[in-house]
Image (cartoon, rainbow, N blue to C red):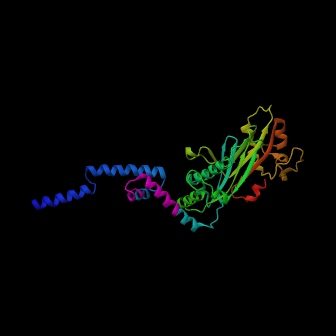
Amino acid sequence: MAALSGALRAKLLLWQQAGLFHSGVRLLAANKDLLVKLRKKTGYSFMNCKKALEKFSNDLKQAETWLHQQAQKEGWNKASKLQGRKTAEGLVGLLQEGNTAVMVEVNCETDFVARNVKFQQLVQQVALGALGQCQRDDQSLSSFMKGFMGSEELLQMKTEESLLKDQVAVAIGKLGENMALKRATWVMAPSDLFIGSYVHGALPVALPSLANMSFGKYGALVICQADRNFKGNLSELGRRMGQHVVGMSPLSLGSLEDESSGDTETRMLSQPYLLEPSVTVGQYIQPRGVHVLDFVRFECGEETEAAEAS
């Protein structure tokens, strides 16, 4: 019995050291809380979060840093393997803050991934990066300013988190498709002008953090000026002008004096107005005391040169 009691005591001691008694249960519960917190904060898998916590003895900060480093490393490996695969799908993202607006195009392989929240978060990061880039120079504007950014410039851009090229690599690693930052445009306007905007095929907002973004397959920004006696809704009129740009694909602005050539017309002001084809765009806006100064149109998957020639 004495020998049996000794063996039992030894086994009970091992169980206690293994965390199966009351004191050990509290330790396991603490680990579980950290695991839930880490997974919620980073979005990485349960197994990877568990591995990170075990590797750094439940140090949350070190575990999070290591997870990001591993994700970036794995993402770059996958990005290298998928490089060259066609990225014909994606999203146009539009972000407007006061009298500054940016529009970006990010591409992926399938529409399924384009609708994924993580892909939309990547588009948002690109838009925020472009917005920050054009707002760096604090200057008073006498007229509007417009600019374009290509793929290489976007990839080297840094957000609060990291370089955009690293964020693309992480997204590729998570979603398993090739991706490309194709282009961005930004418009800044003084207070006496307004920027109309429109996104076609807009997706519902999946997360509250994406509420400042609009996503779709087509987008337009239209720079307008209203006379002092204008009494309508500038936001709604700007949206309608953007809707026309998306639907009618004008190639240039033209002038109010231009004569329309009908359905083949490519000058915006001379085109039959999309929502009221009996009049041209110029004939629609002139009596309302509004002037269209410029526009930009993005269509997901189109040739970049075509958009920049607008």
The secondary structure that dominates the magenta segment is helix
Note whether residue 121 is visible: yes
The residue drawn where x is 84% and y is 36% is: 287
Note whether residue 243 is visible: no
The residue drawn where x is 53% and y is 59% is: 174
* Viewer-closest of 261 and 183: 183
Residue 297 x/y as whole percent: 74, 51
* Viewer-closest of 140 and 90: 140
The residue drawn where x is 80% and y is 43% is: 292
Residue 69 among those drawn in magenta: yes
Residue 122 x/y as whole percent: 59, 53
Q: Quadrant of residue 20?
A: bottom left
Q: Is residue 3 above or below residue 102?
A: below
Find the residue positioned furthest to the left: 1
* Viewer-closest of 192 and 18: 192
Residue 101 x/y as whole percent: 69, 45
Q: Is residue 22 above or below residue 84?
A: above
Left or right of residue 39, residue 269 in this image: right
The residue drawn where x is 42% and y is 50% is: 36
Residue 167 x/y as whole percent: 57, 57
Q: Quadrant of the N terminus?
A: bottom left
Span shown in magenta: 52-73
How many numbered discs sit on the rendered protein? 0
